[in-house]
Amino acid sequence: MIANPTTQVDWNGIAPIITIAVTALVVPFADLFARTHAKRWVAILIGGLGTLLAAGLCAQQYGSTGTVFGGAFALGGFTVVFEEIVLLALFGSLLLFATTMQERRVGGSVALMLWSACGALLMAGASNLMTVFLGIELLSLALYCLCGMNDRPASRESALKYLVLSSTASGFMLLGMALLFGASGSVALSSLTLGGLATSSFLWSGSALFFVGLAFKMSLAPFHAWSPDVYEGAPMPVTAFMSVATKAATLAVLARFLYAALPTGMSSAFLLPIWILAGLSMLVGNLGMLAQTDLKRLLAYSGVAQAGYLLVALAGTTALGLRYAIYYLVAYAIMNLGAFSVAAALSDEKEAGSALSAYHALASRRPYLAAMMSLFLLALAGLPPTAGFLGKILLLSTGVATGYWWLAVLLILGTAISLFAYAKIIRAMYARPDGKAQPELPVAPWPAMISIALYGIALVVMTFYPLTPSNIVPFVR
Amino acid sequence: MDLTVLPVALGDYIGLSLVIFFIGVAGIALRRNPLIVLMSIELMWNAANLLFITFARVYMNNAGHIFAFLVITVAAAEAAIGLAIVVVVFRNAKNVDVDDVRILRG
Amino acid sequence: MIHHVMGVDGTYPLLLTLWLLPLLGGVLCWAFGPQLKTAAGWLASGALLASFVLTIVAWPTATQNLNGAVGAHQALVSWMPGFDFGLLFDPLSLIWTCIITGVGFLIHLYSIGYMHGDRAFARFFAFLNFFVFAMLTLVLSDNFAGLLIGWGLVGLASYFLIGFWFEKPSAVAAARKAFVINVVGDIAIMMAIFIMIAKVGSVGYGDVFSHVAAFGPTLFAVCVCLFIGAAAKSAQLPLHTWLPDAMEGPTPVSALIHAATMVTAGVYLIARCAPLWNASPDAQLLVGTVGGLTALVGAILGTAQWDIKRILAYSTMSQIGYMIMGVGVGAYEGGVAHFFTHAFFKAQLFLGSGIVIHALANEQDVRRMGGLRKKLPFAFFAMLIGVLAICGLPGLSGSFSKDAVIQGALEHGHPWLYVVGVVTAGITAYYMFRMLFLTFTGAHRGEIDPSHLGMRHPELVGTPHGDSHSEHHHAPAWLMNVPVAILIVPTIAAGWLLFGGGASWWATFFATTFAPETLPAAPISEMATTGIVLLIVALGFLVAYLRYGRMGDAKAAAEKLRMETVHAFPALTNAFYFDAALDALFVRPAAWLGALSAQILDPHIIDGAVREIVHLARSLGNGVRAVQSGLLRAYVLLVVGGAVVFIAYYTLIGVHR
Amino acid sequence: MMLLALVLVPLIVGTLLFALPAAAQTLSRVIGVVASLATVVLVLAARGDDWSVRWLSRPFTAAFHLGLSGLSFWLALLLTVVTLSAIVACNASARRDLIAQLLFLEGTMLGLFLARDLLLFALFWDAMLLPVFFTLLARASHVTTAWRYFLYNFAGGLALLLATAAFGVLFGSTDVIGQAGVHVIGAWAPWILGGFALAFLVKTPVFPLHTWMPLTYADTPPAMVAVVSAVQSKAGLYGFIVIGLAFFPDYMKAYAGIFLVLGAISLIYGALAALAQSDTKRIVAYSSLSHLGLILIAIFSFNTIALQGAGLYLIAHGIFSAALFLVLGFVEEREETRSLTHLGGLGALNPRLAGALCIAALAALGLPGLAGFAGELLIITGIFQSGLLWAALLALIPIVLAAAYMLRLFQGVMNGPQRSDLPIRADLSWREGIALAPLVLALLALGTIPGALLQTVIK
């Protein structure tokens, strides 16, 4: 039901979102008045501060419960965790602007990225279909523009592709939402199955289309086609943000749908297609990585596979599974951001660090970056001593425990395939420098270097202190 | 539920919106002019709107109406951005054809 | 009836010392060779002399008899239940120890002269001493595992010494061959050990011999396994092929290892395992037969050799055949006695030949000798005694022991072996005198061109080519002569220990070791046997004399020898094709299979499969990329298709739920 | 705590080495020697210790649980001693990175052998691949080798991972290694065992999963391959003993046939292939395929004598293969070739080098009185006792073949006429001698008085 006027509006609940939105408004003005050579850092600084503030505000709400705006936005641990992940992605991506992107565009880009972060935050807490839609579209619309922010034709092309495909997918999702609304007579996720037609096939076909939309956003095969092209075309910070924030936010919606909206007694046949998509993604994503020459593109395919991994944890929709999904999501966020940070550290406005050829014999020129990059790649491959390893174990154990052993096996298979691709980069980095004169590498600013180190440390520490948010599930409903 | 509130059978509304929807889908999938593609997208979304309105009526629940308005607003924004991007992409192109944009592949 | 409490337990420092002294000497020579220089020889010899003296001093402990426990038993270490190691010093091991240390000492002394000026002088003595230690370990061990350790170590020592001049490819090959064939023997003994552990649960002599019954039908298997080991070590058919090649080693080595001691380890093993053989007539028949055949074949092959050391090598093989025959059929005293006497006269023969070879600057081919009686009178004398002894001239040591063996074969009911023994004795006389005549009588043929002697294929007669050790200097002659002179005494006298049949010193000495048995009187008396043998021997001598005794001047002799060489039986010159057979049966197939696995299976079959899998993954990846065509509308279709499938699935399930 | 230090010291020191300038080779060697010496001391001091900290409580309980007793102790001792020797053996040209990687290898493998928790075991199992992988990568000519090594072993590692997860879920805890009475049963158990077994077979390696091994052994720097062949190859067999025999006894027995056959094939196959090699290091590589096949058979004969023999032989093989690879490394450093067709006649001018190679080769061919013999004798005795007559007979053949190919190796390098085309270099140096001394002494000691080991190695 929609909120009646008497419901008093709880602004605290959406304080983080407001903070980000305000920051998004401030950044362009600051950009206007900033001196030419300060624009880059001014934008990053303000954006970063806003993000940190939002993160702080967000953290306070961990304990709170209930919903605001008449059930439109849920509070509590579940929302907070995903919001924090989104903010982490935002902060990490903002740092990438330090080296990439022409200075004059940084201000606008940062503002847009903040806006799309707003969308992601909305999705994290969205507890009815309208909020979901609003969040997804806010996220996407900003990203369309961000994708086109570079002068390269590839960048514009990616924007167009993303726009058309994403809007199409949104169309399917809208229709699905309409059918779900038709099934229950309500837009609240929590009461989807209560309405008169709950038993009708509206619910089923509606969910089907809804899943299609989510699968597209999570870039699950076969709805992944957009991601390699868009990731490659988009500017590096945008790719980084997209690869983490979109997945996180969409996973939040999906989890909420699976855990809160659906009755517990739902027949397994209802969810089977999603797990099949997961399996398919693991194969397609890992296979797709094999012959790539561009890091962003490779990570796009990797993202497809990783999305599959994430779903293994949700298979069987157990409480533990959700925790491990979140654990792995955090790990994934960190390793992805780490990889992109290294790439950015090797990049200039032309994003030289995006081509894999730039990594040949890196170890002899930038041993630190090479070592860290290897660490992140090992983490993506799931090797110790990284959170990727423990994450894999946790995913596998949920897969086995819930009886989805075939997903576990596919996970192993996919990992084996992925190793080719990841190790190929490592191999290139540790190859002996050949005679050819390499282009002079840019010197990355110290914040970037420090952030990379922090990512690395975090990955190692997470292996030994598996902090999964306990009692998260009660928050979902 | 009470279908008498509808002058026409519920099924017809659904059928109509599905028809519109798939016209839109076909437009996106088959037409090569980006502008028409954008219009087709609008078609899909509006098909959904129609369905929202219908069910809002069925359930006497104006959430559906609100949703529809929301969609229309977003669609406007989306169309604006879309046109902008199309312009940027095809600025120096002779003929406007989505099949020409395929630098990114593999 | 004697029961097998092996030795009186206790601590015997003497025993330990005489066992470890050679090891100490060896280690010292090995470690400080460069510093010691010639002193190494004296050090090594000294160690052995001390060891020998200690043996004599410790004699009483070996013969002590405490209610059935004969000799001394010294416990050492234990691996696990069933694998307890210790030393056993009883009459049998005493005899061997005496020979090993005594004759060993003389040969050490001799070597100081023979090896004088060799580049690796010290290392040679290190190896010799190490060999003695290993051999002592073999004969002193109180269990089969320890025996096996000694067994392997003597093999190693012989490997080192055969290949001592390791710049010579032929020497290297010979060494490897000897070692590998000996390993075959080792694993056979291991097999026997497995059966013992499985049946008795222990490898100690005492435990095994006192539970012979426990083996049941497998007893024969045990005996066969042990005998294969013995055959490999003692150059019995068909594992004898390494012994002639082993003559690549320096002559003292041939004397010590490949005549006096190591090659007789098989005799020791069987004598030691008398309780097993007594309980298994099949084994006795088998071993006796093989021994007899070996004696015969060795003798026959001896007649066709031109290399003086090879002649002696085949004679060794044949003589060991006698011993094996003896201990095999159950005439243990005889067999052991023949080992005892053989050690003296064969060592003497080898050392004598060593003097000759040394004098002729490493010429070993008898066709290029002749007429050396005047030049090397002492060598002639020594070798003459040796030849007479080996032929069994009554009164000399050889006759006593050999007749004992031949007679024993008959007494234990093996007339055929008796015949074989007698015949072999004749052939022995023939080839030994052939060697003697060719070497010492007639005219010297050293200056004649080898081709005129028919030496077109020197490798067939084992003449060393490529004089890699020609840097020999001449040592003071007495260093080499004294040991030989000393050896002449036992060569003549040692046999008299057996005089007196059952009442002889020898018989009484071994009364506690080998159960004295009462046998039916043989159809031929001992005296008669001696007569028959003497007759045959005389025949052999006659033939030898007619053929080689009077060949006239160098020219005629050369021509004669050339004809003989050219028209020699291929079967004989190829040693009855034993080498070729072993090669075709084992060596080449193994090499072929190895090549197959290393060059085809690994790289192509197995790795090929792996590469195929990788390739499959790659092509699938390309498939994924092909779908990623870059065409926007294709992507749309992909999404739409996926959506349609979804809807189809859900509506169907939803309806038929 | 001492155990934790034992694992961390090499890892930390190894990391710190990278802080040194790449030029400081001597310094890094000294540091490496000191560190590895410290680990040896720690191992001896910490025998019998046990240290545990909770790691996971769900989905199954796991702990950072280290223990040092029985087989672990001996393997850890072997590992530390071999590493010490290897680092001492590194000559002045050894790069800082190599020392660091050696220490990493030591640390990760110590973790593996000390781990009392399956999850920790799996972690170190994968981690110990990396040092070798990166070392191989660093040498441009050996990239394909690195590749093969990594992919084979990582595939095995993944199987191990899945098996571990399944084990944890089914049994509820992975903190089980070394505990009695942990028996996994049920329809899943064979599959879990299969997962472990696959990893172990690849690592050992066993036919037909061995093709990564000759390449790796041939291309890895001598110091490192000494450690890899001596200890890393034991990880699989160690796993079979502490995981397979302990948790899946029934299924091990049920499927013993497969492993016996694989072991037997490796036994013969390796020995035959070794006969046909001309690369010295490949000869040794194939020989260890043969030797480890024997140990596999021993494990699956479920016989006490055989198992104790296997324990002894694990250590013995570790020592002599390390010695072999080190000496062959010395030869390679001197003559710049590994091929028997080029080598020969070195013994005349390098008696000490010849002696060293000779002792190592003799131990490898199972010379009575050295450690290898004791192990082989006990193993085959046990196999025979357990009634596997065919296996026992089969196991005897490689002993003869070993004599053949090991002598071929030794004589091919040291004997024969001197080669004029080979550079003439100094004989074995004091440093190299010291590096080998502990190994040789251990071979003698274990060959004559293995009692102390036999009683404690396997309960």
Image (cartoon, rainbow, N blue to C red):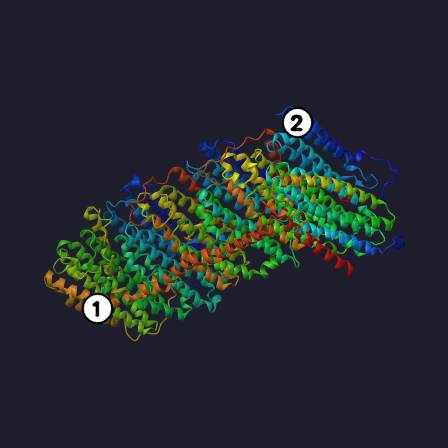
Q: Where is residue D194 drawn, in percent x and y? A: 59, 56
Question: As shown in the figure, which amino acid type bears the numbered disc 2?
Answer: Val
Checking the image for residue C537, the label placed there is 1
Residue positioned 77% across, 40% down in the render: B73
Q: Where is residue B15 drawn, in percent x and y? A: 79, 55
**Dot 2: few (<14), some (14–19), or many (≥20) neighbours within 10 Å?**
some
| Residue highlighted by disc 2 | A42
The single residue placed furthest to the bottom in the displayed view is: C523
Question: As shown in the figure, which amino acid type bears the numbered disc 1?
Answer: Val
Q: Which picture quadrant has residue C40?
A: top left
Q: Give left or right: position of A388 versus A138.
A: left
Residue A319 in view here: no
Residue A206 in view here: yes
Q: Which chain carries label 2?
A: A
Q: Which of marks 1 and 2 is in front?
A: 2
Q: Give left or right: position of D417 versus C11.
A: left
Q: Give left or right: position of A187 versus C128.
A: right
